[in-house]
Amino acid sequence: MLQDLVISKCRVKLLQAFLGQPNEIFYIRQLVRRIGEEINAVRRELDHLETAGIVKKENRGNRIYYWVDRNYPLYGDLLALISKTVGLGEIIIKNKNKIGRIKIAMLSGRFARGLPTKEGTVDLLIVGDILIPELGKIIRNEETKVGREINYTVMNKEEFEFRKKRRDPFLLGILTDSRIMLIGDELDLVG
């Protein structure tokens, strides 16, 4: 999907590396190994990303380190795009028919940013007619990859609407926190 918008394959891989782990700092050789591209292509794209203000760099010893600039005006938008093309977001979107009939799927903004889950919230909310064993298998596989527990909640449409009308504190906590919509429209979620 992202390859349809960004022409450079190397740039797509770099954005996925930086925004897939927004708390990480990378040096050039590390990025070359991680994304499997030639060092000159990586250097060229890093220069472009730095000029655009998407990444920052710092010299430390004999290495140059790069990280994503969270103050970049389109940081949240890029994070949402990347969250849909790598990791749990990508897996949910690719397997949506296998999981069931999903009306709404959203990741918490904290999860997308690599931050710990706040008390009383979830990393993933899915609304629809869901095959719980299939979703559980996908979640367990992803937990192994990321090395942490993924808190998720599944509701059918009726339960979701009922809780929303009753202003359920658990659901309101999810709806008022930052989020990235994977499937469905944000108006369906909060409207």
Image: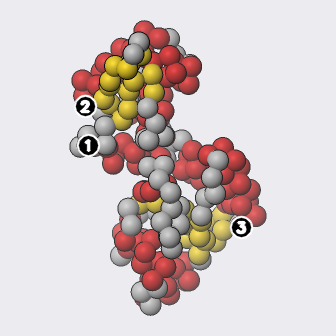
Q: Position of residue 34 (x, y in %)?
A: 56, 24
Point 44% across, 49% down: residue: 113
Q: Earlier in the sequence, mark 3 or mark 2?
A: 2
Nearer mark to the viewer, of 3 and 1 = 1
Which mark, by number, is residue 53?
2
Nearer mark to the viewer, of 3 and 2 = 2
In this picture, residue 24 sits left or right of residue 127: left
| Residue under numbered circle 3 | 132
User: Identity of the amino acid at label 2?
Assistant: Gly
Say if 38 sits above or below 146 in the image. Answer: above
Q: Earlier in the sequence, mark 3 or mark 1?
A: 1
User: Identity of the amino acid at label 1?
Assistant: Asn
Q: Position of residue 81 (x, y in %)?
A: 41, 44
Q: Position of residue 33 (x, y in %)?
A: 56, 19
Q: Measure the alpha-carbon separation of dots 2 and 1.
A: 9 Å
Mark 1: secondary structure: loop
User: Identity of the amino acid at label 3?
Assistant: Ile
Q: Measure the alpha-carbon separation of dots 3 and 1.
A: 38 Å
Point 45% across, 27% down: residue: 26
Mark 3: secondary structure: helix
Point 63% across, 52% down: residue: 148
**Identity of the residue furthest to the front in this view:** 61
Label 1 packing within 10 angstroms: few (<14), some (14-19), many (20+)? few
